Image: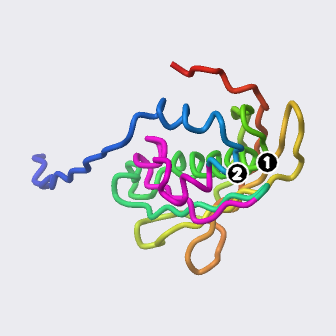
Amino acid sequence: MTDTSTHHARRRVLTWQDPLETAARGRSLSGLAFLQQMADGAIPPPPISMLMGFRIVEVSPGRAVFACAPDESHYNPIGLVHGGLLCTLADTVIGCAVSSTLEAGVGYTSIDVQVSFLRPVTVRTGELLATGLVTKPGRRVAFARAEIAAPDGRMVATATGSCLIIDRPPDAT
């Protein structure tokens, strides 16, 4: 049997700013101020935002909202958006919600994230809205949850996660 299918190549070009410069600019800011400046465009987003197509919609103490419009580059081999995109989106809003509660010079790193995928996502689903909310702040560990919704308000995924609170290193190089 001969494969008669045709392959139509697509292309995606990414550009980003130096992430270490972004991190350096954030060291003197509270987590909330850092995220607000990123949302306003005064500080460039990290490369992962460009790769995954994430953008900050709003941020307030203990809350972060991001949007993401899945495209074909996010598809898995069975024609659905890969769960890794949703997991990364959940981890992002959980971490940013926690970050929004932190003082200047204090950072975080993810400990874990538990994601429940509730329905399949395709390009036709439309722009996803992910909301992260801190459920328990802490000095060493903070806990948060995430909800990812389709434009019609239906949940496509939920998640919980925890973050280790750390001193930001003076130089992340």
Residue 20, above or below 52 = above
Find the magenta span and give its range: 35-60
User: Given the current orientation, which residue lies at the most extreme bottom position?
Assistant: 152
Location of residue 60 (image quadrant) = bottom right
Give the residue type at disc 2. Answer: Leu
The image shows residue 170 at horizontal and vertical percentages of 63, 21
Residue 118, above or below 49 = below
User: Is 149 on the left or on the right of 162, as rendered?
Assistant: left
The image shows residue 27 at horizontal and vertical percentages of 63, 33
* Secondary element type, mark 2: helix
User: Is 138 on the left or on the right of 42, as rendered?
Assistant: right
Residue 49, above or below 152 = above
* Secondary element type, mark 1: loop
Inspect the magenta stretch and tell me whether residue 40 lies in it: yes
User: Is 44 on the left or on the right of 66, as rendered?
Assistant: left
User: Given the current orientation, which residue lies at the most extreme front position?
Assistant: 28
Residue underneath mark 1: 101
Give the residue type at disc 1. Answer: Thr
State the mark number for residue 32.
Answer: 2
Label 2 crowd (10 A; few <14 / some 14-19 / many >=20):
many
The image shows residue 42 at horizontal and vertical percentages of 49, 53
The residue sitting at 41% across, 48% down in the picture is: 50
Dots 1, 2 in contact, CB < 8 A: yes
Q: In this rendered view, identify the residue nearer to me: 173 or 53.
A: 173
